Amino acid sequence: MKNIVILGSTGSIGKQALDVVRANRDKFKVVGLAGGENVEALLQQVKEFSPIYVNSPNIKEKSWNNAKVVSLEEMAVVPEADLVLISTVGSVGLVPTLEAIRSKKEVALANKEVLIMAGELVMAEAKKYNVQILPVDSEHNAVWQCLMGDCTFGSGSVSGPVKRIIITASGGAFRDWPVEKLDSVTPEEALAHPTWSMGKKITIDSATLMNKGFEVIEARWLFGMDYDRISVLLHRESIIHAMAEFADGSFKAVLSYPDMHIPIQHALSYPERFGVVWKQLDLENLEKLSFAKMNYGRYPCFNLAMEAAKKEGSYTAVLNAADDVAVHKFLDGKIKFTDIEKIVRKVLDEHKPIPHPSIEDVIRIDEEVRNSLK
């Protein structure tokens, strides 16, 4: 029995993680649930799973439905927990991740912002405390599986015969739209992802391909690979989630339907692999698996992410905060879809970089960028 804490339990990943627990009740015990502002959804989860600890920004009591109310940082280090799933959205996941690492918990990471903001810091702490970060994102979980058996990896470094890793991209909601039409797209159109069902923020980032830029940055830190050894390939079907190319010219790939339950279960159950519960891939009836080079001219946000990534230092913290604000402005109808890249670029151009920012620097920069864009 593995005792787990879920930070972000009322979000898309958190809900699917609880589906995994339901399907494996003899293997998991939920000891902590941290939800968002949707207290009603959290209440239903608390009634079903009876955690010891609970958190929500809308709960002010010290005890709530027989659970002790604690902060996110406190929940990340509770003595009963074996594994902490970081599935919060945004910068709020950074400090709890560091606290969980320092307490030598298993950390299953589904929060992109943690490594975008402070990848160097987080992986240094993981190495110091000998904690392996277990990737939950479908692409990084697939890379992780591809490297198993051929390479030694963990805490941000990899050794072995791997030549490069390949992350696939569906191309997002506007992959076939004329570029000149992108000025007029609505939030509803941008939220219509062709293959995945995800939260609003990540779906918009998928439409701009900023999300794929974030994933390349995450891969750089998780696996310790230079950017020139990380490729992105257009794969419309979203069946192959990532591949590894090896020195002998062979490839390994991970295939499944686009269903986050599968990588979530793999990360939570590691080093075991539980029996099939989710929809199995029917290879015999797949019409095709297609691949194409990315047309990066269509995706200025991806190019911008790579510019910031290669500068490293504090630039990626700025990138993350500015994109978050810009995306929410678009969702609120305050800016055009094509303004997202313009806003982020302006903030990056004005930034005075810090080569190796401390955690205090990262948090301060995040706040300053958000305040400057209000």
Image (cartoon, grey):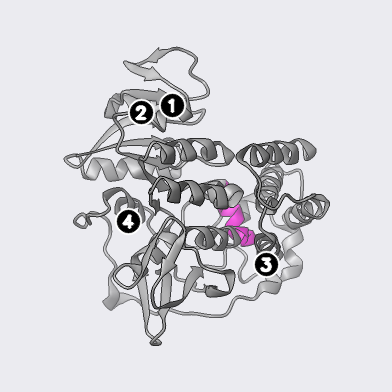
Asked if labels 2 and 3 touch by Cβ distance under 8 angstroms, the answer is no
**CA separation in Å, label 1 and label 2:** 6 Å
Q: Is residue 362 above or below residue 40?
A: below
What kind of residue is marked 4? Ile
Residue ID for mark 1: 74
Amino acid type of disc 3? Tyr
Quarter of the view holding residue 157: bottom left
- The image quadrant that residue 371 belongs to is top right
Mark sitting earlier along the chain (3/1): 1
Q: Quadrant of the N terminus?
A: top left
On residue 262, the disc is 4
When the figure is inspected, residue 168 is found, relative to residue 207, above or below; the finding is: below
Residue 208 locus on image (x, y percent): 64, 60
Task: Mark yes or no: residue 127 visible.
Answer: yes
Magenta range is: 201-210
Q: Which mark is residue 78?
A: 2
What secondary structure is found at the residue carrying circle 2? loop
Say few, some or many: other residues with alpha carbon within 10 Å of mark 1 (under 14 / 14 to 19 / 20 or more). some
Of the residues tagged 3 and 1, which is closer to the observer?
1
- Marked residue nearer the N-terminal end (3 or 2): 2
* Image location (x, y in percent) of residue 266: 30, 55
The crowd level at tag 2 (other Cα within 10 Å; few <14, some 14-19, many 20+) is some
